[in-house]
Amino acid sequence: MQKRISPALAISGEISLPGDKSISHRYAMIASIAEGATRIRNYSTGADCHSTLSCVRALGIEVEGAGTEFVIQGRGLDGLRKPAGDLDAGNSGSTIRMLSGILAAQPFGTRIFGDESLSRRPMQRILAPLERMGARIRARDGKFPPLEIQGGELRPIDYTLPVASAQVKTCVLFAGLFAEGETSVTEPVRSRDHTELALREFGAEVTVVRQRITLRGRPKLTGRELAVPSDLSSAAFFIVAALLAPGSKLSITGVGLNPTRSALLDFLVGMGARIRVPNLESSHGELVGDLLVEHSELRGGVIDGALTAALIDEIPVLAVLGAATEEGLTVRDASELRIKETDRIRTVIDNLRRMGVEAEELPDGMVIPGRQKFHAAEFDSCGDHRIAMAFAVAALRGDGESVIVGAEAASVSFPEFWETLSACASG
Ligand code: S3P
């Protein structure tokens, strides 16, 4: 599918966005192994979170509902059933990595696979800790999906993550739920903590001391009513679009502003962005607020170290923004970007160059000089949702009509993206 995007003078109005992808996955998985019903409102409409729902259904869990509201009938820690066939994680790294922690503890074997992009993504990072817990898993070439997981009894672990990854942390904590005793995970830098917050909501005992998270195994998890805040990583595309277009004044309601995710706002405000957060409140342990964004002149900046890990999903759209700032943008310590849905350093640089924007590729990042002009171009999502949406934002600043090839990729996290964009962009 191709989308044609014309330049926009302003991004304005009030928009609401789909539920947070990271939180939706976690609520659905934990609800499945909790006792009793969990009602989830504002569940992500993205294909990734629907992959998680189909996997838990295949594991014998009743999921009722449609759209953004689902009721999941949890069957307790020992209630999953052997699926009739293979589990399909689609494009979703979160589904395969996090669910594997649960599958590794089951008294039956499962095979879980994904699409072409997921089949190239590294799984060694979950295999190592799960094997130390006693799991037996076979992966293609020892490291890629499909995974054949021979479930069984697990022992607790005290594990130090070699890479900052919330998916791996979650996988180990989920496996730890089934092991008798305490499982601990120490992270090199603090990653998003939705798992810790969600597990506490369902009744697990989770303690966090600096970068070390400890969980007591075999907790009683109880189903409950939950609402997912809107996804800040999806909001990022609209925030950047509004900051760049001169007449913009945009309001985005009910966005998840968990401090382990909201570095984006601090980074932008530090560069001179006019963003206000009225109505901040806490919901199921998560911070939620409205965002008011106005067009701003931005200085530019550097993303490196722990900040890179905190902004990892937003870097494609920040790269677009960087080219329009005063001093440009440098990204370092981001080699993880090379193993996302695409090699996002390559796909970002290729698309920036298509619109005549200069950018230097580094092994672990990129350097994008500021004050550049955006020319209309044909962009290629390469099947990556965040690339499709980042370059739709770039296209709004073009000097003519641009085309996004592979625009359907946006549905992985944000099926309503194109509709929402045309509702708030005015030429
Ligand atoms: C996610 C963690 C991040 C992020 C991904 C979602 C999560 O991946 O890029 O989009 O929900 O835990 P890593 O865990 O690989 O850093």
Image (cartoon, rainbow, N blue to C red):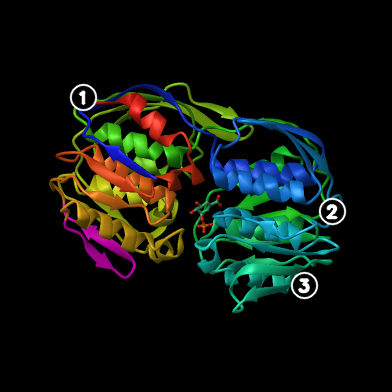
Residue that lies at the very extreme toward the bottom in this rendered image: 141
Q: Amino acid at mark 2?
A: Arg
Foreground of the two, 306 or 399: 399
Q: Amino acid at mark 1?
A: Gly
- The residue under label 2 is 81
Provide the secondary structure element on which disc 3 rests. Answer: loop
Q: Quadrant of residue 236?
A: top left
- The reply to whether the C-beta atoms of the residues labelled 3 and 2 are less than 8 Å apart is no
Residue 109 in the magenta stretch? The answer is no
Foreground of the two, 71 or 223: 71
Task: Please say whether residue 412 is visible from this viewpoint.
Answer: yes
Q: Position of residue 336 (x, y in %)?
A: 43, 64
Residue 368 in the magenta stretch? The answer is yes
Provide the secondary structure element on which disc 2 rests. Answer: loop
- The residue under label 3 is 134
Please tell me the numbered disc located at residue 247.
Answer: 1
In this view, the mark in front (1 or 2): 2
Q: Position of residue 100 (x, y in %)?
A: 69, 60
